[in-house]
Image: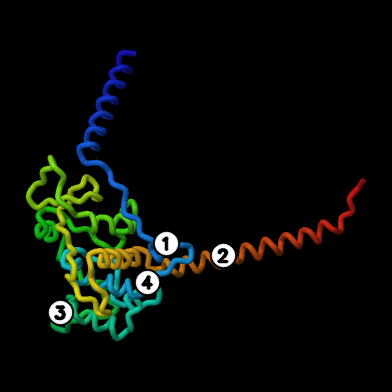
Amino acid sequence: MKNFFKLIKFLILISSLIISNVYAAGEKQDLLKVDWSFKSFFGKFDRASLQRGYQVYSEVCASCHSLKHLSYRNLAEKGGPEFTELEAKAIASNFEVTDGPNSDGEMFERPAKLSDKFVMPYANTQEAIAANGGAYPPDMSVLVKARGGGANYIYSVLMGYEDPPAGVELDDGVYYNKYMYGNKIKMASPLDDDIVEYADGTRATVDQMARDVTTFLQWTAEPHLETRHKMGFRVIIYLIVLTILVYFSMKKIWSRIETKV
């Protein structure tokens, strides 16, 4: 019995420490809500937003964050940004990849092709950590699905940078973000108005860029989302038709059976 009470006291102590740490980390903020075009049952990606989102990724995010599960050919596939094949080839040709060995047994550099994976910004994890002050920039391929809140969380973090409230002290290289877990982040705000010049003439405000790159990252995480939505709709229609046919078939079968009084 004495050991039982000791266990209860220990659990109470641990619970108190956890609660105090939660309050110390900062009050949780409700995420910003956006009416994303891809979220409804019949949801589709906004093609223009996807293409702008790729531009934001390539010009702002790609220097630190990888997309290791994506190939350049995916940019031209149906259901994605749907660049033309020539446009996708031109995008790929801007990057150098290591290939080989050649006939002399040596590795060599060549322009990337559609079949190549997106070029990684760092050679390895250690280089990435060293270049970012000890913080590892996560791969963005499935980042939307890996974070609670999904697209709304990514968008909120991009929009959540602000000066820390009174009494909150930050270490050097740490920034305050009211939507980040713990309110502290080692990545400086990546977006500023007009930091990119959109090819379609859209004004590149922080809000617009945050929406576009979030849409793009939703696609990288779920490249077959539109196909899945279409398949789900077809399955529902099939089940409705099947139910109706079964109903009338059973009605016809049971109509032949005389009811005994």
> In the figure, residue 240 lies in which quadrant?
bottom right
Q: Who comes first in sequence, dot 3 or dot 1?
A: 1
Residue 67 shows in the view: yes
How much space separates mark 4 and mark 3, taking CA atoms? 35 Å
In this figure, which residue is indicated by the disc labeled 4? 46
Amino acid residing under circle 2? Val
Residue farthest along the left direction in this orientation: 172
Q: Is residue 22 above or below residue 33?
A: above
Task: Determine the residue positioned at 37% across, 77% down.
Answer: 77
Q: Nearer the viewer, residue 250 or 55?
A: 55
* Left or right: residue 118 compared with residue 164: right
Sort mark 2 into few (<14), some (14-19) or many (20+) by Cα contacts within 10 Å. few
> Which label lies toward us, 1 or 2?
1
Sort mark 3 into few (<14), some (14-19) or many (20+) by Cα contacts within 10 Å. few
In this figure, which residue is indicated by the disc labeled 2? 235
Residue 146 shows in the view: no
In this figure, which residue is indicated by the disc labeled 1? 39
> Which label lies toward us, 3 or 1?
1
> Which label lies toward us, 4 or 3?
4
Image location (x, y in percent) of residue 52: 28, 73
* Left or right: residue 37 compared with residue 91: right
How much space separates mark 3 and mark 2, taking CA atoms? 48 Å
Amino acid residing under circle 4? Asp
How much space separates mark 1 and mark 2, taking CA atoms? 19 Å
How much space separates mark 4 and mark 1, taking CA atoms? 11 Å
Sort mark 1 into few (<14), some (14-19) or many (20+) by Cα contacts within 10 Å. few
In this figure, which residue is indicated by the disc labeled 3? 109
> In the figure, residue 210 lies in which quadrant?
bottom left
Task: Determine the residue positioned at 28% across, 59% down.
Answer: 155
